[in-house]
Image (cartoon, rainbow, N blue to C red):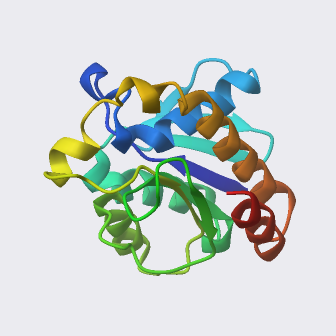
Amino acid sequence: MRLIAGLGNPGEQYAFTRHNMGWLCADFIAVNNNLGKPRQNFHGEFWKWNDVILLKPLTFMNSSGISVSEAVNFYKIDLSDILIVYDDMALPFGKLRLRAQGSAGGHNGLISILGALGDLHVPRLRIGIGKAPSSMINYVLGHFPPEERDKLPEIISRASEAVIAWLTHDIQRAMTIVNAGA
């Protein structure tokens, strides 16, 4: 069993904010693979897709570890079989980076997950949102300006392709594919 966790915040006011890039990716995968309506469990919404759990934590970003660790513990998923998909201000808007492990880089959702799992060896797909011009909180919870919103479908499509690369290749090959084209 493998787990893909797309991070975001619940609530209509957050639906198309920078902090919900992981949710946008999860929704895109669910729709494009005809997964139907999600089930409710693990403090989140999830779809079972062959041997994959596609999870959207409903705990709010800063408590994502609650949801992810519940799913990991229930299905007894190895850390290398988890992929966390989230927004990252350290990358330019639209840039993708797949990594096998590492620190949280100050991202509160990833801090929560790594803390709950007790390990840094968790694969992650970072979706660049660019640097905050001023207030970080206002930026990540802010809506996309028109020029960025117009690019979202292509970025989310590439992010979902990166998830598929992770599912179909070993992590090193997937990183080569994703990071070369990102």
Q: Residue at x 67, y 33 (%)?
A: 29
- Residue 18 placed where, x, y %? 36, 40
Residue found at the far front of this picture: 147
Q: Is residue 159 left or right of residue 165?
A: left
- The quadrant holding residue 33 is top right
Confirm whether residue 159 shows in the render: yes
Q: Is residue 143 above or below residue 161?
A: above
Q: Residue furthest left?
A: 135
Q: Quadrant of residue 95?
A: bottom right
100 above or below 86? below
> In percent of the image, x 73 and y 60: which residue is there?
178
Residue closer to the observer: 165 or 76: 165
Q: Splitting the image into 4 quarters, where does residue 65 fall?
A: bottom left
Front in this rendered view, residue 76 or 16:
16
The quarter in which the N terminus is drawn is: bottom right
The image shows residue 177, relative to residue 6, as above or below, that is: below
Residue 125 screen position, x and y as percent: 58, 59
Residue at 27% over, 45% down:
140
Q: Nearer the viewer, residue 81 or 102?
A: 102
